[in-house]
Amino acid sequence: MEIPLFPLHTVLYPGGPLPLRIFEQRYLDMISRCLKSESLFGVLLIKNGNEAGLAETWNVGTLAKIVDWYQGSDGLLGVTAIGQQRFRLNSGRREHDGLLIGDVDLLPDLPICPLPEEYKPLAKILEGVLDDLGRLYEEVERHYDDAGWISYRFAEILPITPPQKQNCLETDDPIERLKSMRPALDSVRL
């Protein structure tokens, strides 16, 4: 499967929101095509480089579906996307306008994993945090009984490093994902 790629200094998780402000022509064109054809684009974490130039990325990313867009008062295009399925990048090529196109394999959807009793207090904490974050999480379906969903939301909002966030994306076991974030969770718990 070939998809347009958007390398960023952030990780997008399945079910999570991604606010973007688009100003580069290659991405304006990509967003326009995605909106017209209701197609998806891929988000990959940048390992080295920058968003406006050449970048080396990790090989596992997430498909993004545009759910809202607006023209900002500064003239920039604002977009909100929601993470869909994870994918593995096999190879990529650069179009004449600089847009990256990736040949990807979709990774299987992970089954719902009931939230273990020891992590149930996290669901209540997360509910309050997401409510406080407001508009960004309005479009996000909530699954407070699913350890995978809970672990992805905490990976989004906790102050962990980009490689740790990438590791959370690549970890299939949601309980292992929660365990790996335990130090960060303990440090911010009230």
Image (cartoon, rainbow, N blue to C red):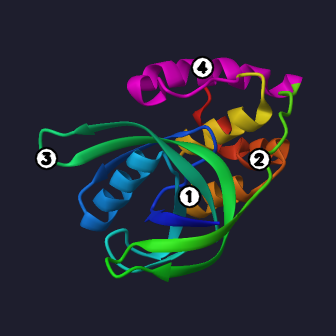
Q: Nearer the viewer, mark 2 or mark 1?
A: 2
Amino acid carrying label 1: it is: Thr
What residue would you read off at disc 2?
Answer: 177
Q: Is residue 16 magenta?
A: no
Element class at badge 3 = loop
- Give the image location of residue 37, x and y in percent: 45, 49
Q: Label 2, label 3: how many angstroms apart (C-alpha)?
A: 39 Å
The disc at residue 75 is 3
Of the residues under marks 4 and 1, which one precedes in the sequence? Answer: 4
Whether tag 3 and tag 4 are in contact, CB under 8 A, the answer is no
The disc at residue 172 is none
Of the residues under marks 2 and 1, which one precedes in the sequence? Answer: 1
Depth order, front residue of 187/29:
29
Amino acid carrying label 3: it is: Gly
Quarter-of-image position of residue 54: bottom left
- Give the image location of residue 160, x and y in percent: 57, 52
- Give the image location of residue 62, x and y in percent: 60, 54
What residue would you read off at disc 1?
Answer: 161
Quarter-of-image position of residue 165: bottom right
What residue would you read off at disc 4?
Answer: 127
Q: Nearer the viewer, mark 4 or mark 1?
A: 4
